Image: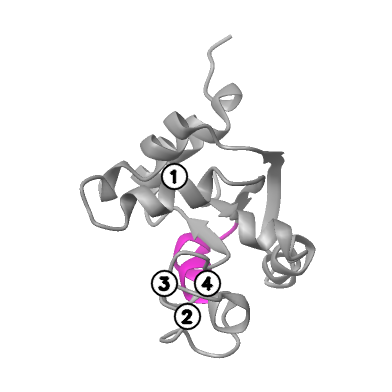
Amino acid sequence: MPERTLIILKPDAVARGLVGETLARFERRSFRITHLKMMRLSREVAEELYAPHRGKSFFPALISFMTSGPVVAAIIEGEGVLRSVRLMMGETDPLKALPGTIRGDYATDITRNIIHAADSEESFRRESKLIFPELWEEG
């Protein structure tokens, strides 16, 4: 099975009309979008998604932001996709993100930074079960 990752285009990406442009960047790299959905994260799902950051000072603001509007989630696959997506996104802080990266080109601050992506196979499994539970149901 090809390597996969989960990305979430955050409420700022949706509100600013950057969904198509951002997804096109992955397609131009020859990665395949296998699943795609627009949704609004519940507080419970957002808190579980960002559970590794629970207790950090920015956690409440992050959860509030992630539940403030619709997001677009996608599963992307292809050789080396985990590493490539992380490089394409750029640094979390847009002031440190290089031009040409998604965050370097579009992010406005450290919370409103356009995109989230799983950083490992383990994160992909945990996060995709929250966002695409139907893919993991037996039957």
Residue 92 in percent (x, y) is at: 41, 72
Marks 2 and 1 sit apart, C-alpha to C-alpha, by 23 Å
Identity of the residue drawn at 52% across and 32% down = 42
Q: Quadrant of the N terminus?
A: top right
Secondary element under disc 1, as helix, strand or loop, is helix
Q: Is residue 7 left or right of residue 29?
A: left
Amino acid type, label 4 = Met
Of the numbered discs 1 and 4, the one sitting upstream in the chain is 4
Amino acid type, label 2 = Pro
Residue sitting farthest toward the left: 55
Q: Is residue 130 above or below residue 75?
A: above
Circle 4 sits on which residue? Answer: 89
Q: Which residues are magenta?
A: 78-88
Identity of the residue drawn at 56% across and 81% down = 101
Of the numbered discs 2 and 4, the one sitting upstream in the chain is 4
Of the numbered discs 1 and 3, the one sitting upstream in the chain is 3
Circle 3 sits on which residue? Answer: 92
**In this view, the mark in front (2 or 1):** 2
Q: Residues within 10 Å of mark 2 (few under 14, many from 20)?
A: many
